[in-house]
Image (tube, grey):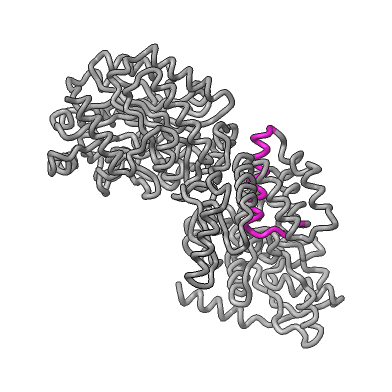
Amino acid sequence: MANSQIRRTLVEEGSEKSPMSRRIMGRVPHGSFAKPPGPTAQDSMGKDTLHLLSYKGEFLKPCPGTKEYICCGYQILNVATNCPLDCSYCILQSYFLHQPHLRIHVNLEENLGAILAFIDRDPEQIVRVGTGEFADSLALDPLTRWTDILMGPFSERKNAVLEFKTKTNQIDGLISSPYRDRIIVSWSLNSPLISATEEKGAATLKQRLEAARRCQSEGFVVSFHFDPLIPHKGWREGYLKTIDLMDRHLKPQGIIWISMGSLRFMPDLKPIIRKRHPGTAILDGEFITGLDGKVRYFKPIRIELYQFMRQNLEKWHSDLGLYLCMESDEIWGKSMGWSPGDSEGLKGFLDERVLKIFR
Amino acid sequence: MIQVFHMDRLKTADLLPQPVNLNQIDDSPGPYCMSYGFDTTPLADSIRRIGLINSPILVGKGEGGDEVEWVVVSGFRRIKALKALGETHIPCRILPPETPPLRCLLINLYENLTIRDFNPVEKGMALARLLEWVPEKKVVKAFMPLFDLPSREETLHVFVQIETEFERKAKDLLAHGDLSTKAAKLLLEMGSAVREGFCRYFSIIKFSKNQQTQFIDFIYDLSHIEDNAITRLLDDPQLTDICDNGHMNNPQKARALITLLRSRRLPHLVKAEKGFRRMVEKLALPASYRITPPPFFEAPQYRLEISFENGKDLMEKLLILVKKEGLVTLEDPWDKSV
């Protein structure tokens, strides 16, 4: 998947000697190296261009939640920005409007020490880390082999978990690794219609769940994210089908958590979506401006979505670690029947899940 | 380099005006023109009263055999005004035929920059003309700030598109401030028939800037949701009836259009707002009490305001409120299932 889409590779000066650059350059189509950067059409976001660079910022950063809504306290490991998939709802379209290309931070290995030192500074503090915030965690793994770099060090640490979040079935790197402990493999799921029409380039739902089954059978802990939930024609039946597919493929006991979030975005994303995905139906919902300035569904719609999902997921299994991503205490209470109260409470709930699943 | 430029500048200042037949001047917006949507009347009045102060600058067309010999470098408005006054010959400064086009363009640009503001269409004209001779990066960096525009490529593209893609009607509205730049940007994403449909509304109804973008946004969304062409939506009798309503003034029409579209675009929210208003009305509280919902009902708390004169008055009003029947029925105004 990743290899076939790459039309050219840009290597920033000084980045060509890093071990990751050398590995990637050995795997991408021959003769595609070039010096950066030429302006790339914003419409395509440069998704056919692999851009190898040394990242100057902090690799590990807390998820930029807002105080108005309850955040899970996740740490984002910023290994790359942008992603070869092209989901119509993706917030990266506006985040990285002026930073096109599939940007791989090839100095990850050099910075691994600092990342691990952050985790080690307080062994009592559980650190939940994910690489899937600014890029799909596994879509480019055949080239980058993030799995080789990260799984060992995280597996050795009892106070951290590393979550690979993906919409692909690129699990070879995971499976071939000897490490299982403290690794969570996670899939974003949606209704069959949304998956098929709005998640361009992603694996089909069935492929994702087959990959999840394989990971479970290989001893991995898995998780799922129903995010963004999108009400659409026949959404109840659609999401039930997905839950039914989960039932057919997975053992619910091995699931550490399932998050739910509804479509939300900064207002500047809307014209970008309209332009890049003219046929999309995701903007047809009834949106309001949330307390954080993001556009989101009118409150009762969100409550109904979460209630429905919660009821049906709990029918499948009662202990799935269900939680809401960036929702208010009120929405938690009205849709989930309980609330962690605040971000600290949610962090505690998820840390407990880590302790329970990774004994 | 600086010296050469300085000498060129002196040369331009030294040019002696010579009489030119107005019929031999091409008065269509040529390669150096950056004037749009202007009214020649005040200028014609001024010329009539005190004469032409500053003579236009022309350059030869460069191709023989044509009756029209001159292209306007600077003074497009003056030439239009002089024609309107019925003049036949006017004094003009003539640039040497070998004058590079970029220099002609810059002469006009800087002359205009010193004496007036550019409307958005004129900014687009100037930037589009600059792009023919100057690399895009330089236009972005060096020229856009001259027009009080941010040095951003997307902004440049928007203004150039306004010049190259907008029809006359849309340009007129924009030049006269009847169409906001933000709304113009949205209209750029649409075809000319759709744009024409919106412009029809904007030329009749004086929306605020915010209302213009709301109007476009609602119509655009509704066309997707209702699977209806924008042009047909714009012809919807519900909308056109408001435009034709003789009992409403212009701001009332603008508000009525937005309210109508909002109720179609956000039916559950509007229903909830109405339901909440009904609930509050049912309480029949005196005017000194005010209960309001949070914006979009998003925050969990409603708000109660009480106007009072002193502590005793407040206590009495609180007691009235506490005893108010039906207060406990005040709740979220939406159905369980939406």
The quarter of the picture where the C terminus of chain B appears is: top right
Above or below residue A187? Residue A120 is below
- The residue drawn where x is 14% and y is 39% is A124
| x and y percentages locating residue A147 in the rendered image | 24, 27
Image quadrant where residue A162 sits:
top left
- Let me know if residue A142 appears in the view: no
- Residue A211 in which image quadrant: top left
User: Would residue B200 be found to the left or right of residue A125 on screen?
Assistant: right
Q: Main secondary structure of the magenta part?
A: helix
Q: Quadrant of the N terminus of chain B?
A: bottom left
Along the line of sight, the residue nearer the viewer: B68 or A192: A192
Q: Residue furthest bottom?
A: B50
Residue positioned 71% across, 76% down in the render: B56
Q: Which residues are magenta?
A: B205-227
Residue A149, image x, y percentages: 20, 31
Q: Position of residue B272 (x, y in %)?
A: 60, 43
- Residue drawn at (18%, 23%) of the image: A179
Relative horizontal placement of residue A233, taking residue A265 as reference (left or right): right
Is residue A228 found left or right of B217 in the rendered image?
left
User: Magenta stretch: residue B224 in it?
Assistant: yes
